[in-house]
Image (tube, rainbow, N blue to C red):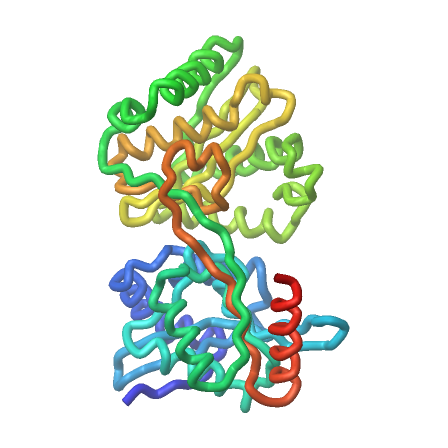
Amino acid sequence: MTEYRLMGWADALAAHRADWLALGIEGRLNPTLLPDWTQVIVETLADPATVRVLVGTRGPTLTGLIPFRIRPSRLRGFPVRILEPISSILAYHAEFACREDPAGLLGALIRSRTEIPWEFVRLAGILSESETARTIHAVAAATGCGLVHWAGESSPYVPVGTSGENLLNARNKRDRYQIRRHAKDFEATDGSECRWYADGADIPELLQAMLHVEAGSWKQKAGVAISTRPMETRYYERLMPWLASTGQLLANVLWIHGEPVAYCLCNTWQHRYGCMKGTYREEFARLAVGHHAQDQLILRAADAGAVEFDFLGDADPYKLSWSPTTRRHDDFFLYAPSGRGRWLGLAQRLHERLRR
């Protein structure tokens, strides 16, 4: 029989790190859901003192866990307490880290409100066709929790399993011409250079280049540049050395006369490459440096033995030109079946009906 208990973040990590990693590898989870990456997220984007972990064990075997926090907020003017798994702060292709009985794990999370009050659970970025998504629907029906879900991102990915040259030759004539023209135009530019980054010693230069590029990109005006968000800067300062130390880092920066003009940052895990960040300085848009940096990274990953290149973000046209294949995601909101949670859930479902 599986036993569930709540633990503090530090205690849970110390007791279950190795088993958590083994469980994640066994389940082929995205690396953002594994213990070391989760630790970076907790310690840079959250407050570790507020993070708890629901742990399921059967004898000495770890069957599943959900690290989470309770976040105060307001919904339609009412103060609410949101239970938010750490994967809802940042994760790619979120699923439950669970070896068996995901319904039991989620059910135990819902029962946690007797110890830690909350009005609703926010589960963001869940893979639409996953066992986790099916479990959320089933548990909501079984427990009487109000359920609202929204369509999230459709994230393109490229099945690879071949060399960069073969991958390029598989593109249509127009795309091949564009990719080769971008490379030719950049290489013909005086003072141009493409630098590659994988080692920890290169991280300070890589990070400063990223910040410089972001500060001159469209992201700066939109308020989403790393350079304007100190918490996100700290996240990458902490994450990239760890990626490098574990062989998971691959990035490139395009330079012109010693100035970084575009970059693409990627992680690699089990021969799957994920494009986490990338952009270009707007004054160099005419050279298509953003496209060139990303194209070169894809081709380099293919030559390194990639089985997949994952764009991770939403389905922009330039990504779909590489592959129409996508992974769909949903955001789920589970409202407590009694008290304020019940009424908030009813109001939210009514609002959704009217909005449609």
Please provide percent x and percent y for residue 113. Answer: 55, 86
Residue at 62% over, 82% down: 341
Residue 244 at least partly seen: no
Question: Of residues 156 and 60, which is closer to you in this image?
Answer: 156
* Residue 151, placed above or below residue 76: above
Residue 253 at least partly seen: yes
Please provide percent x and percent y for residue 314. Answer: 50, 45
Which quadrant of the structure image shows residue 95? Answer: bottom left
Quarter of the image with the N terminus in it: bottom left
Which quadrant of the structure image shows residue 171? Answer: top left
* Left/right of residue 3 with respect to residue 294 in the rendered view: left
Which quadrant of the structure image shows residue 310? Answer: top left
Question: Of residues 59 and 77, which is closer to you in this image?
Answer: 77
* Left/right of residue 315 with respect to residue 352 in the rendered view: left
Total count of labels:
0
Please provide percent x and percent y for residue 119. Answer: 61, 80
Residue at 48% over, 73% down: 9
* Left/right of residue 160 with respect to residue 93 in the rendered view: left
Residue at 51% over, 31% down: 263
* Residue 135, placed above or below residue 107: above
